Every structure is written in C-alpha cells, then in structure tokens.
Image (cartoon, helix red, strand yellow):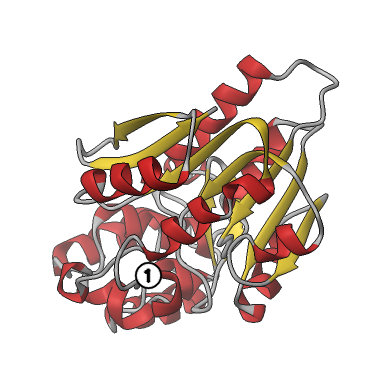
C-alpha cells in the first residue's frame, strides 16, 4: 500500500492543473478520514487507508469536476458542508462576509436577545449554519427558490427554518420581520467572466442575473416589508456594481447608511446597509 507521502509527490509530479497542492491534500485527507491537514502531515509516512477511493476521486477530479463535488462536501468557517451540483461550492470570500455579520451581531445584540436573521438564496445553507453556530439565540431562516438546493441545505443546518420561494417572498408570506438579512444572490451578467470549470459544473440558477443588479433591486423594493426599524443587510456583490447599487439604494432605501468593502483579493465584494 502506498503512503500519503508517496501519493502526494506522485501527483505533484504530474503538474495537472486540476490537482494543485491544496486539492491533493484534500483528497488524501478524505482517503484516510483525517479531519484536518495537521493529522495528514503527522501521518505522512503511513499507508493511505482507502487507496481505491483515492484513485477513483483523483480520476474524477482530472476530468475537471470540482473536487468538492467529487468528495461530496466542502468546509465553510470550519464547518463541514455537504455539497452537490445543485448548490454553489462555498467560497472563502463569502466567509469574510459572514464573519463581518457575526462581529456586527455580537456588538449590537446582547446575550439573551433573539435577533431574527434570514439567509436569502441559501444554497447549501452554509451562511445560515455559520450564523446559527455563533449566535445561538438567533432565530434563523433560510430561503431558496430551488427545492433541490433546500434538500442539500437540510443536511447541513440545525435549528434553522428552511423556506422555499423567490428571494424574500417567503419571509413576506409568513409576516416575518428581520433584524439581519444576508444574501449572496446570482449577480453575474457577463458569462465570459465565469471560470470555465465553475460555468460547466456549478448551477447557473445561482450564478447568472440579467441585469446583474436584478435581485438586489427586488430585495431593496421590499425592504420596508421585511426589515425592522433598525437593521443590517449584508450582500456579496460583483466588483463593478458600486455605482448602480448606490443608485438603487437612493431610489428605494431612505435613512440608511451603506459601506462597500473589499475582499481578501482586494476586489470590491461586499455591501453593508445599516439603519
């Protein structure tokens, strides 16, 4: 049986574009049921537990299938999240958005408060889960128009209410008022800006919008129906949206302040609206 070290360097020598170091490490961790890379490296010279699984997964990854779909899971803020082709793979940039929201909530809500939160376009449920894990007393809802996506989310969340429907419509239908809204909606208008692998395998329903600001406008229009008097709305955005989103906020949202933030790659990526 080959060791983790042997398989690692064997694949590294191939220099396959779908098998960078991080992916090889993830596949080796999965094959030996290691929970983190530290466990892998401390057992680097041990035999791989399930070599057949490893080789099968490598073969699929070499076809271009995202390794997270091959494994059936990804990680988001330390939480193992089940994924398949019905949901987007959680991104590192989105972790930044959620951390900012959690920091805000811990600052403005006291222990024992029960802030009402909605994760709109939840997909895998990663955002809703991370918030509920950190803000135990929060009442968390998660909406998605895709029944298949909600089936995936159901496997990932606990003590979160899942609602089927378009954007905030399920929140309105149930007469819910929110303190915090978090949303990573479809926003890519130009398909040529999408990575080839992402475009081929990840759900277009969760990626594409024409115009790119379409779903933000829908939410802004209905904000007075769903948000409490004081609120936070947090969005992931595309880096060319600042001006059109300012125009929409001026049109629909009175008395709020807003901030645009950059992501870890120095791209404009987040919008925070506070009232």
- In percent of the image, x 62 and y 15: which residue is there? 107
- How far across and how far down the image is residue 143, in percent? 66, 62
- Quarter holding the C terminus is top right
- How far across and how far down the image is residue 210, in percent? 31, 73
Quadrant assignment, res 15? bottom left
- How far across and how far down the image is residue 58, in percent? 36, 75
Total marks drawn?
1
24 sits to left or right of 69: left
* Residue situated in front as seen by the camera: 136 or 16: 136
130 sits to left or right of 99: right
Crowding around mark 1 (Cα neighbors within 10 Å: few <14, some 14 to 19, many 20+) is some
Q: Is residue 42 visible?
A: no
Circle 1 is placed at which residue position? 207
Q: Is residue 125 above or below residue 54?
A: above
63 sits to left or right of 172: left
- In percent of the image, x 36 and y 49: which residue is there? 248
Q: Could you tell me which secondary element the residue under label 1 belongs to?
A: loop
Quadrant assignment, res 131? top right
Q: Is residue 248 above or below residue 7?
A: above
Q: Is residue 91 above or below residue 162?
A: above
- In percent of the image, x 49 and y 40: which residue is there? 234
Q: Is residue 66 visible?
A: yes
- In percent of the image, x 55 and y 62: which residue is there? 121
- Quarter holding the N terminus is bottom left
* Residue situated in front as seen by the camera: 23 or 154: 154
- How far across and how far down the image is residue 60, in percent? 37, 82
Quadrant assignment, res 199? bottom left
């Amino acid at each position: 049986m080959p060791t983790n070290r042997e398989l690692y360097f064997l694949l590294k020598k191939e220099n396959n574009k779908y098998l960078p170091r991080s992916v090889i490490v993830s596949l080796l961790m999965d094959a030996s049921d290691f929970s983190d890379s530290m466990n892998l490296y401390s057992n680097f010279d041990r035999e791989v537990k399930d070599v057949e699984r490893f080789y099968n997964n490598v073969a699929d990854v070499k076809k271009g299938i995202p390794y997270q779909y091959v494994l059936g899971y990804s990680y988001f803020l330390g939480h193992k999240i089940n994924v398949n082709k019905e949901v987007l793979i959680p991104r590192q940039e989105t972790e930044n958005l959620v951390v900012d929201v959690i920091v805000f909530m811990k600052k403005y809500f006291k222990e024992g408060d029960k802030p009402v939160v909605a994760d709109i376009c939840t997909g895998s449920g990663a955002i809703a889960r991370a918030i509920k894990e950190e803000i135990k007393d929060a009442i968390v809802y998660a909406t998605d128009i895709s029944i298949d996506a909600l089936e995936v989310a159901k496997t990932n969340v606990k003590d979160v209410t899942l609602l089927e429907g378009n954007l905030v419509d399920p929140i309105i239908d149930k007469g819910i008022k929110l303190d915090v809204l978090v949303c990573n909606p479809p926003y890519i208008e130009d398909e040529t800006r999408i990575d080839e692998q992402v475009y081929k395998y990840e759900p277009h329903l969760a990626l594409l919008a024409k115009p790119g600001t379409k779903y933000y406008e829908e939410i802004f229009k209905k904000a007075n129906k769903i948000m409490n008097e004081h609120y936070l709305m947090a969005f992931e955005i595309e880096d060319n949206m600042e001006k059109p989103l300012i125009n929409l906020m001026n049109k629909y949202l009175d008395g709020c302040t807003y901030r645009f933030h950059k992501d870890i790659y120095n791209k404009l990526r987040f919008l925070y609206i506070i009232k």
